[in-house]
Image: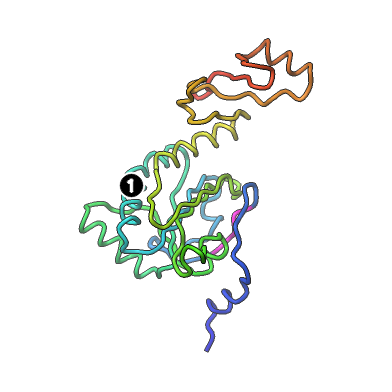
C-alpha cells in the first residue's frame, strides 16, 4: 500500500535547487522541537537552513556542536538555525540525546525530518550519494526568500564562522545597499570598508569620485556603516 509520503515523492520528478531571490520552498514537517511549518513559523526572522548526510556520523556531529556553540551569535543577528537530514525524527532525537551524553552539548535548535524536503531543496546529489544529502546551507531572508546557497561535499565540514561572516555581509547589503569586497571585513586593500554601487552615468561617476574613496571611477568605497 502506498502512503502519503510515497505519493508526494512520486510527484517530485526532478531534484529542484532553489535560486537566490526565489521564495524558499514551503513545507510542514516533524522536528525535534515539534511540528515545523516553514516559512510561517519564522516570519520576520533570518533562517540558516542546513542539511547533513546522516545522524550519528562524525563530521555531522562536529558541525552540529559548532552550530550550537555559535547559536547565540546567530540569534544576535535575528537568525534561527534549522537542521535537516533524511533520517527520521526518532533518529534525530536519539542523536541529540547522544550528543548531550557524550559531549555535554545540548542542541537547542530543531532538526526537521521529511524526505520531501531533500528534493524541494536540491539536497540529494546522486553522483555524490544517492541516499544521503550533501552539506547544503540556505540563508533565507525575513520575507522567506533565498538570499544565499552553499554546497559542501559529504566528507568536509563547514566553517561556521564563514557562514556568520556571509550572513553579516548579506544583512549589510540588504540594509544599506552596499556590497562587500573579498574577505570582508578583512579585505587586503580596503579593510572593512564597503563598496558603493558602480556609477551608471558619467555624472554619477564624477559624484562618486568627489564623495567617496575611489581607486577608479568604477570602484569606490565607503566607511563600514555598522561601526
Q: Main secondary structure of the magenta part?
A: loop
Q: In the image, 101: left or right of 33?
A: left
* Helix, strand or loop for disc 1: helix
Name the foreground residue: 141 vs 182.
182
**Residue furthest to the top:** 210
* Residue matched to label 1: 66
The picture places residue 223, in percent across and down from the top left corner, at 54, 18
The answer to whether residue 139 is above or below residue 58 is: above
- Whether the magenta-drawn stretch holds residue 25 is answered as yes
The answer to whether residue 157 is above or below residue 192 is: below
* Callout count: 1
The picture places residue 148, in percent across and down from the top left corner, at 56, 45
Q: Residue at x 76, y 25 (%)?
A: 200
Q: Residue at x 29, y 66 (%)?
A: 94
The picture places residue 204, in percent across and down from the top left corner, at 75, 18
The answer to whether residue 17 is above or below residue 21 is: below
The answer to whether residue 227 is visible is no
**Residue furthest to the front:** 127
Q: In the image, 38: left or right of 55?
A: right
User: Within the image, what quadrant is residue 155 found in?
Assistant: bottom left
- Whether the magenta-drawn stretch holds residue 127 is answered as no
Q: Residue at x 44, y 39 (%)?
A: 164
**Which segment did they paint magenta?**
23-27
Name the foreground residue: 161 vs 91.
161
Q: Residue at x 44, y 62 (%)?
A: 112
Classed neighbour count for the residue bearing mark 1: other residues with Cα under 10 Å, few (<14), some (14–19), many (≥20)? some
Q: In the image, 37: left or right of 71?
A: right
The answer to whether residue 67 is visible is yes
Amino acid at each position: 500500500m502506498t502512503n502519503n509520503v510515497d505519493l508526494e515523492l512520486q510527484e517530485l520528478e526532478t531534484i529542484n535547487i532553489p535560486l537566490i531571490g526565489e521564495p524558499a520552498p514551503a513545507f510542514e514537517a516533524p522536528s525535534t522541537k515539534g511540528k515545523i511549518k516553514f516559512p510561517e513559523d519564522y516570519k520576520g526572522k533570518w533562517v540558516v537552513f542546513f542539511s547533513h548526510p546522516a545522524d550519528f556520523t562524525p563530521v555531522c556531529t562536529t558541525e552540529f556542536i559548532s552550530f550550537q556553540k555559535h547559536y547565540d551569535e546567530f540569534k544576535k543577528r535575528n537568525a534561527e538555525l534549522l537542521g535537516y537530514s533524511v533520517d527520521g525524527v526518532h533518529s534525530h532525537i536519539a542523536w541529540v540525546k547522544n550528543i548531550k551524553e557524550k559531549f555535554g552539548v545540548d542542541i537547542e535548535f530543531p532538526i526537521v525530518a521529511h524526505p520531501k524536503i531533500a528534493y524541494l531543496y536540491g539536497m540529494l546529489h546522486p553522483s555524490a550519494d544517492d541516499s544521503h544529502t550533501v552539506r547544503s546551507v540556505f540563508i533565507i531572508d525575513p520575507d522567506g526568500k533565498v538570499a544565499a546557497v552553499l554546497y559542501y561535499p559529504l566528507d568536509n565540514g563547514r566553517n561556521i564562522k564563514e557562514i556568520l561572516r556571509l550572513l553579516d555581509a548579506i544583512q549589510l547589503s540588504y540594509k544599506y545597499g552596499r556590497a562587500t569586497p573579498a574577505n570582508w571585513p578583512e579585505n587586503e586593500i580596503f579593510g572593512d570598508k564597503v563598496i558603493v554601487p558602480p556609477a551608471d552615468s558619467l555624472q554619477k561617476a564624477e559624484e562618486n569620485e568627489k564623495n567617496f574613496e575611489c581607486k577608479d571611477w568604477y570602484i569606490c568605497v565607503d566607511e563600514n556603516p555598522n561601526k
